[in-house]
Image (cartoon, rainbow, N blue to C red):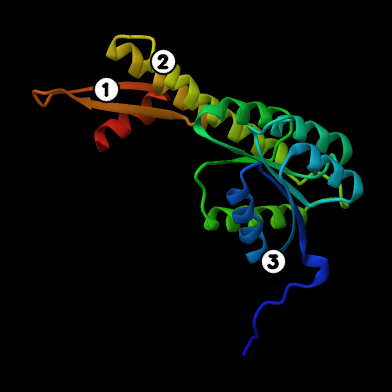
Amino acid sequence: MSGPAVVTQTDVMRVLVVDDNASLLRFLVSAFAANGCSVAPAAAAEQAIELLSAEPFDLVVSDINMPGLSGLDLLRAVKGRQPGTPVVLITGAPSINSAVFGLRHGAYDYLPKPFSIKEIQELVVRIRADRQRWNGPLGVPAGLAEELARRQFGVETLFHIGDLALQGLEPWAFVEKVLDSTVQSIRCDGALILLRDEEGNFTSSQHGDAGLVSHMLRLL
């Protein structure tokens, strides 16, 4: 019979959490500690930079919008001092563009508010899995660049679709552009959107391999 999993001292991940909201900061400390992490809290980016100057961290999690220096400023500071340390940005809906900017400039990922303890747990699991593939303490996880590019492209595609919805396009033109963006985003061989009008008649918009799309249409 196997016993409970044991986290050794060398397995403990050192996490710096940064947020000017005291209640959210307490939540972050509790959530990461519950997942076997050693957690250092900071109420401002300036305080976090002081901590970064004193010791290394395995992960930095920071809100984007804070008084004084922002989370993006902190991201630049982390990459300047500890370039191999992954940075996760916390964002609300109004600052999602800043999150995309952060991904472009080296952020590992972002957490959209509100998030749960389960999402923190999943983040810790991903970080630990990536750390096992690092070449030394400040290496870069294998495949991370490709993963960041995929996430960034997906987020940008969603923004592009949102922009299209505000352009007042004719329905058929909107559907065509959405389908084209989706095909590019997931890099598929063929895609199909099937629409039914009020009278029950179907029309389709399709992109990609003609034979594959025809087969999909028959299945539908």
Which residue reaches farthest left?
A: 199
Quarter in which the C terminus is drawn: top left
- Residue 39, image quadrant: bottom right
Q: Residues within 10 Å of mark 3 (few under 14, many from 20)?
A: some
Is residue 143 shown above or below 174? below
Q: Secondary structure at mark 1?
A: strand
Q: Earlier along the polypeptide chain: callout 2 or callout 1? A: 2
Q: Are marks 2 and 1 in contact (CB under 8 Å)?
A: no
Give me the C-alpha separation between circle 2 and circle 1.
19 Å
Quarter in which the N terminus is drawn: bottom right
User: What kind of residue is marked 3?
Assistant: Gly
Residue under pointer 1? 204
User: What kind of residue is marked 2?
Assistant: Leu
Residue 218 position, x and y percent, is 25, 33
Residue under pointer 3? 36
Residue 131 position, x and y percent, is 76, 54
Q: Nearer the viewer, residue 146 or 118?
A: 118
Q: Secondary structure at mark 3?
A: loop
Query: Is residue 176 at least partly visible in the picture?
Result: yes
Q: Residues within 10 Å of mark 2 (few under 14, many from 20)?
A: some
Is residue 64 shown above or below 18? above
Q: Residue at x 49, y 23 (%)?
A: 159
Of labels 3 and 2, the one closer to you: 3
Residue under pointer 2? 164
Which residue reaches farthest bottom?
A: 1
Query: Is residue 180 at least partly visible in the picture?
Result: no
